[in-house]
Image: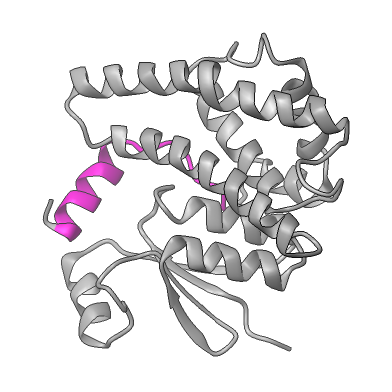
């Protein structure tokens, strides 16, 4: 039996959360090692496990993987969540990159001053309503299918749901003008592996709190 993937990151969302989501969507169990101290981080660097000195770090299939997008692409391809050909794959990449941009705006806001954080999160909601969500609503309307690419469940669907739920934490009514996205959210949330991941007690992480921010700052010496 193959070893479970091992994820090494802070005890929070950050750049690892989309990796957790994709593994969960594929029905893959994984283990986690949480970085709590500078010493842990320095040991990872000393041992040569961080190619560019950065986390996330994922160990699986006999490999030590870093760089978020590379890891996500590998998982999507491995678990058949990456379209059927190059044309579908580039669309999956395009949609996933867009939602990742939006989610990183939310993740980085946690490290701003209170005033800047409030301003940044308000900008996230505005961009979601005026740029990102209208684009995805149009995609769903134009092809009339249940999923974003090739009418088959893919990484793009997983990450869009993750982004929707993150923005809804900031504004619960953000989908009020997007009926197709509302239906998409319900549909994708009902997929058994996703439904399981959304249950309390799963490895899904909560929004960043002060302890998470303090730990990241201490470890990375920000």
User: From which residue to which does the magenta span run?
Assistant: 203-220
Give the residue at x 27% y 61%. Answer: 36
Q: Residue furthest left?
A: 221
On screen, residue 220 versus residue 9, left or right, reads: left
Asked if 205 appears above or below 178 in the picture, the reply is below
Q: Which image quarter: residue 19? A: bottom right
Q: Quadrant of the N terminus?
A: bottom right
Asked if 129 appears above or below 28 in the picture, the reply is above
Q: Position of residue 179 (x, y in %)?
A: 76, 15
Asked if 116 appears above or below 176 in the picture, the reply is below
Magenta-span inclusion, residue 213: yes
Q: Position of residue 155 (x, y in %)?
A: 68, 53
| 57 or 120, nearer to the observer | 120
Magenta-span inclusion, residue 63: no
Q: Which image quarter: residue 132? A: top right
On screen, residue 46 versus residue 199, left or right, reads: left
On screen, residue 66 versus residue 113, left or right, reads: right
Give the residue at x 31% y 23%. Answer: 120
| 180 or 109, nearer to the observer | 180
């Amino acid at each position: 039996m193959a070893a479970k993937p091992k994820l090494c990151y802070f005890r929070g969302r950050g750049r690892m959360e989309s990796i957790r989501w994709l593994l969960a969507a594929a029905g893959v169990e994984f283990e986690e090692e949480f970085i709590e101290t500078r010493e842990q981080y320095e040991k990872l660097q000393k041992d040569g496990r961080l190619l560019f000195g950065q986390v996330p770090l994922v160990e699986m299939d006999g490999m030590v993987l870093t760089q978020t997008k590379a890891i996500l692409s590998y998982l999507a391809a491995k678990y058949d969540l990456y379209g059927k050909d190059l044309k579908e794959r580039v669309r999956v990449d395009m949609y996933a990159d867009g939602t990742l941009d939006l989610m990183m705006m939310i993740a980085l806001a946690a490290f701003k001053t209170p005033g800047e954080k409030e301003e940044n999160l308000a900008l996230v909601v505005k961009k979601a309503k005026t740029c990102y969500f209208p684009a995805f609503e149009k995609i769903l309307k134009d092809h009339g299918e249940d999923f974003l690419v090739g009418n088959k469940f893919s990484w793009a669907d997983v990450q869009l749901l993750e982004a929707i739920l993150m923005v809804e934490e900031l504004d619960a009514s953000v989908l009020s003008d997007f009926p197709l996205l509302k239906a998409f959210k319900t549909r994708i949330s009902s997929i058994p592996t996703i439904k399981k991941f959304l249950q309390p007690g799963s490895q899904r992480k909560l929004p960043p709190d002060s302890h998470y921010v303090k730990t990241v700052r201490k470890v990375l010496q920000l």
